[in-house]
Amino acid sequence: MSVGARTGTRGRWARFAEDDWPDEEAADPGVSGVGPVVFTLGFEDGDAVVDLSQWPCPRLRRPLGEALRRVGGQGKPVQAWQTVQGLLPPLRRFLDFVAAAEGAGGEHFELADLEPEHLDAFEQMLVNVYGRDSGRPHAQVMRVVRVLRAVHDGDPDAFEPEFAARLGFTTRHSGPAWTPLNSYPGPVFEAIKAAALADVREIQARILEGEALAGRGEDPGVGGWGRLENVLWHVVHRGPLTAEDSHRRWEVGHRLGGVWRLNSRLYLNAHDLLPFLTLLICVTGLEPSSAQRLRADCLVNPARGFVTIKYTKRRARSEPHKTMRVADGGAAHHPGGLIRLVLRLTQRGRDRIGGDLLWIDHGHQGTRETFAGRRRISINGLHARWLQRHGLDQLTDHDGGPLVLDLRRLRKSFKSQQYLKAAGVLADFAQGHSPQVAARHYADIGAHDELHDRAVENGLAEALQVALPPPVVLDEDGSRLGGDDLEDLPPAQVQAALSGEQDVFLASCRDFHHTPFAAVGKPCPVPMWGCVECPNAVFTTRHLPQVLAFLDFVERQREEMPPAEWQLRYGTAWDRLVHGVRAKFSDVQVRTAQAITEADGSRLLLPPELWETML
């Protein structure tokens, strides 16, 4: 685009590049810097500058920057700087790709020029770089599409219809299957929680003892620096000791343990944060980032042994402010009691610096709000030593590997316990999440595979019971065994069953040529134990020896076959014979049939090939 200008009656048209004109948005008081390509986003933990001025394709970078400015910042859909920061490298890579593909035309390439092939080719380039089995192509294209969708939401006419339709899905290559983070084994989770609780009690005892000692002390300038209680009195009334105190006073630096240990008698230190955070996540299920950003006024509405925790979940986008109703009490294993204990132990530091966050510690950098701004305390190096100190390094994970402490997995373990208590009922479990998120992230994890497999088996068993009528079992006089509400057989079928004229291996058949497993007039094609699942089968005391012999054969097969194969082949037949047939005969009838079975196998009507397997 160019703009022309003339002066007087003589002269010529002058052309100016679009980027030479002042950006109209530079006057926006909410923007720091030039237009939407250099701007400041305000987050709860501080401001961050986004600079797109060196990116290629100027007519693309400006609307992309405007979209980032519109969605990022406190009170906007993207409220975490780390999330915005994660969007920038893929966006820059996409613009570099478009610029390389368009060559000299990249300087004038606009949103309307984007075609589905640009995204598809960009994705294919990433697949070629990282490999088809990598998840990075999907992740990077997903971030690019997310920003382009924000552009489309702000200006639905910005793209051609074909490209707007392409934004309806993310990638063509799905990459590797996503596996949610697993929980810890139940005993491991309980051991971690118990170790954290023990440490919390020791820290509490240490600081309360320090306060008691300080209450018995006096100004060390009068009473001397050689007494521990005088030094603690100084820390209470004049602030924590410094390195200069250690250099000037031999007692502080050597005999009494040093500045760091003395200050830790009255303030939490960095080492104390790990057990406190661990225990808090174990008893509340808070996300680690939400637990770290709790404020001193996070407890509200205490009543009847419960209290509400106010916290921020920045990943929730438009609704980051959440609440949680938890147990309150006078012990550290109650969530409300634990937070009150932290408030009590950090109040001295809060009074000193005037902060309003829950976590206050004192260390080499002085008294500070531990997680103020975007600060992340480096506690990863403490994990292994903490596990070793409590003997937790001897425990193993699901895969038999060594235990590694991950605060996110503690949250998963808490959620897993809730899921198991809810017996897998998603409606009772999905509190604080949509049903889709609860199912995908917290229910569908490796620790619940056994529960889910058992639920599927039970469901199939119930479906089978509905689909298959109960076996027909007749007493010696032809009466129906198993309940008064069952329909009696016609007299002719009763007589045929008792006489043996319709016997087929394990039972009598009502009509061998009218089977549900073949066309009318065709003989029954199922194996001999298929009779057990057939509604035509009738069992009498005369068949009971065959049934018991077959059950003995099936039990032997159980010992020789893999469980899954045995269940597939014999599971249904075994269950119906044991619970649907044998259980309906009296103990006397079963003992008699068992004696007959053990006396002479030649009487049994089992086929020769089965006897060859049994003998």
Image (cartoon, rainbow, N blue to C red):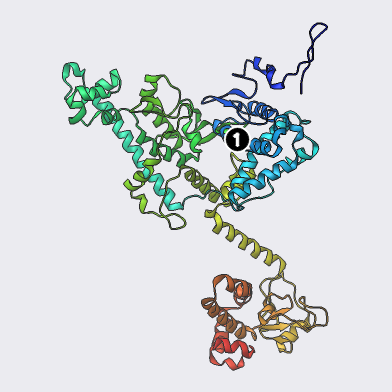
Residue 327 location, x and y as percent? 48, 37
The vertical placement of 463 against 159, above or below, is below
Q: Residue furthest top?
A: 8
Callout 1: few (<14), some (14-19), or many (20+) C-alpha neighbours within 10 Å?
some
Looking at the picture, does residue 46 appear above or below residue 614? above
Residue nearer the viewer, 413 or 163? 163
The image quarter in which residue 273 lies: top left
User: In the rendering, at what x and y percent does residue 267 appear?
Assistant: 33, 28
User: x and y percent of residue 239 in the render?
Assistant: 30, 20
Please give the count of numbered marks on the rendered protein: 1
Say which of 230 and 380 sits in front.
380
Q: Quadrant of the C terminus?
A: bottom right
Q: Is residue 468 left or right of residue 289?
A: right
Establish if 405 lies above or below 266: below
**Image height check: is 384 above or below 83?**
below
In the image, taking residue 329 as reference, residue 322 lies left or right, namely: right
| x then y, percent, for residue 508 | 71, 84
Q: Quadrant of residue 366?
A: top left
Residue ID at (28%, 30%) = 260
- Quadrant, the N terminus: top right
Q: Is residue 427 visible?
A: no
The amino acid type of the residue labelled 1 equals Leu
Q: Residue at x 72, y 85 (%)?
A: 497
Residue at (21, 28) in percent of width and height: 253
Q: Front-most of 291 and 420?
A: 291
Q: Residue at x 75, y 72 (%)?
A: 487
SS at badge 1: helix
Q: Quadrant of residue 31?
A: top right
Q: For residue 506, say whether it is visible.
A: yes
Look at mark 1 in the image and give the residue it sits on: 87
